[in-house]
Amino acid sequence: MANLILLLGDQLTHDISSLREGNPDKDCVLMVEVMEEATYAWHHKKKIAFLFSAMRHFAESLKEEGWTVDYVQLDDEENTGSFSGEVERTLKRRDAEALLVTSAGEYRVQEMMEGWEERFGLPVRILEDDRFICSREEFREWAEDRKQFRMEYFYREMRKKTRLLMENDGEPTGGEWNFDQQNRKPAKQDLFMPTPHQTEPDKITQSVLDMVSERFEDHPGKLAPFWFGVTHEDAQAVLDQFIAEALPCFGDYQDAMLKGEKFLYHSLLSLYINAGLLDPLEVCRRVDKAYRDGKAPLNSAEGFIRQILGWREYVRGVYWLKMPDYVDMNFLDAKRELPEFYWTGDTDMACLKAAIDQTLEEAYAHHIQRLMVTGNFALLAGIDPKAVHEWYLAVYADAYEWVELPNTLGMSQFADGGLLGSKPYAASGNYINKMSDYCGGCKYDVKQKTGEGSCPFNSLYWEFLIRNRSKLEDNPRMAQMYSTWERMSGDKQEAYLETAKAFLGQL
Ligand code: FAD
Ligand code: DLZ
Ligand code: SF4
């Protein structure tokens, strides 16, 4: 045998660099379910089940293509429980000349891989993960000499590079790069709401579900009902249905939230893209084509493509540029413990309850729930950003550190001091009330600013601004809020601060 090819759980792509470099006639692919990966975060049960089932299905498809695959299941008696242990054990039974791997998504695993050549005494070739549209090096060059990074400018470069939604004269389709002004409509309950494509568990998935329910009983979240797709075909079906049914309204209602409507017009594609079951560029091309075929409006197609071509690539670039120090950043010096209700949903704030309950049920919440409900609350309450990061990394089926950390620590908690976003995403109850119908069924009154029964977001918002005044008041995008505060009467200011203090005291 020539090479041993280690394939990680989020590398389930047939033409990934490590498989492209390999030779199915000679090389052996190694895939391992290991306790180290299943427990480095307190992963949601559905996330573990999704990944193990997708890995097992992918291994079967590789065998059908003619590859020799060594697949180690979690309950294999000899399983050592770690990537390094399993590579070592395989090298003892298989006579490999070199180890081939595609570089890891997470810094932690990449570092581990970089120690393998010395540890195992054989050549280790770590290949670029070219499933991303922008390489780590290309992002580094873009970021060089920029004090602040802004996604919008990076995104324009990516549009030019890929020619997505571009005209032959080099201008963006529709004459603008961004149609976000059209994408902030609140939704109403009487809208037609598509249901995302659901996959029936097959025998492989069922046996994974049995194992996860037994071995990960103490992990957060509900395992049933389990309807995630676990193969490339399943993921394609989710994409097809999204484009046909939800994409047309994706843009209009991108920021909306509705009671009982967990998915609205979102795609639920992130878990498949991040695990390698869908190619991000292909997904964008399909959406570009849907627009050109007259099947989706431009504000939807552009808004959707921007999330993948812009945000997804951008956060990955920031992650690799700034790790390993990024994870320890805490610009606002926030120290409060994460409230227990993040793990249980046991809160009488209706917006938080809705977002957390559905997170525990589905391992999914859409972007505005993550950013403006759970994220906004943690930001205002001054929760330690590392604890917030650990929560997000655990509870979402799409969570890997390279994408989760910049979104949480940077975008949502402003813990990087504005490297990723230009101002904190802090908002009072008014924003949540405008974009959702949660407040109607809440114990708190969103219109009441202070005192008992007032919406906690209202007083926390001002207390947050005052607590962090020295760090935020020079930010030009915050100036208006500080001047509003200055125009308030002393009594009003005191009432805000007292109400927030009382709330935080009992948190
Ligand atoms: P849609 O709304 O349908 O968007 C389409 C696609 O765009 C997504 O599938 C995703 O691939 C991409 N996308 C959208 N927004 C972002 C973004 N900000 N960063 C990267 N990609 C984006 N996304 C993850 O994939 N994994 C995470 O762990 C993750 N953690 C997050 C934590 C916080 C605090 C916040 C605010 C956002 C996080 N996001 C994360 C980004 C975003 O919320 C999810 O990608 C999105 O909600 C996934 O649902 P969807 O597939 O229905 O997305
Ligand atoms: C998330 C995850 C889990 C839960 N389990 C495994 C596993 O047992 N084996 C595996 O190869 N990958 C798993 N993963 C995904 C890895 O955590 C992911 O590949 C790395 O974090 C990427 O750097
Ligand atoms: Fe959330 Fe406040 Fe509205 Fe209640 S009143 S749902 S706490 S924003």
Image (cartoon, rainbow, N blue to C red):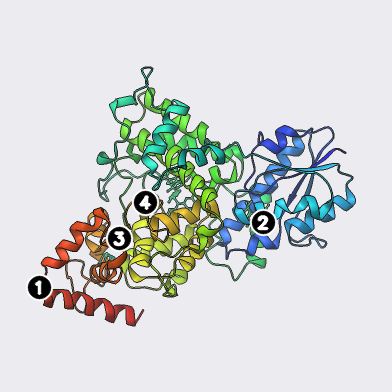
Which of the labelled discs sits on residue 421, or is there none?
4
Q: Which residue does the image show at 66% across and 36% down from the upper left? A: 16
* Crowd rating for badge 3 (residues with CA inside 10 Å; few <14, some 14–19, many 20+): many
Q: Which residue does the image show at 70% across and 55% down from the upper left? A: 112
Q: Is mark 2 within 8 Å of ligand 2?
A: no
* Crowd rating for badge 4 (residues with CA inside 10 Å; few <14, some 14–19, many 20+): some
Which of the labelled discs sits on residue 322, or is there none?
none
Q: Name which quarter of the figure residue 346 lies in.
A: bottom left
The reply to whether the C-beta atoms of the residues labelled 2 and 3 are less than 8 Å apart is no
**Does label 4 or label 2 sit earlier along the sequence?**
2
The residues tagged by marks 3 and 1 sit, at their Cα atoms, a distance apart of 22 Å
Q: Secondary structure at mark 2?
A: helix
Task: State left or right for residue 252 relative to residue 383.
Answer: left
Image coordinates for residue 152, horizontal then vertical, percent: 36, 40
**Does label 2 or label 3 sit earlier along the sequence?**
2
Which of the labelled discs sits on residue 208, or is there none?
2
Which residue in the structure is indicated by mark 1? Answer: 489
Image coordinates for residue 150, horizontal then vertical, percent: 38, 44
Q: Name which quarter of the figure residue 295 lies in.
A: top left
**Does label 3 or label 4 sit earlier along the sequence?**
4
Image coordinates for residue 168, horizontal then vertical, percent: 38, 17
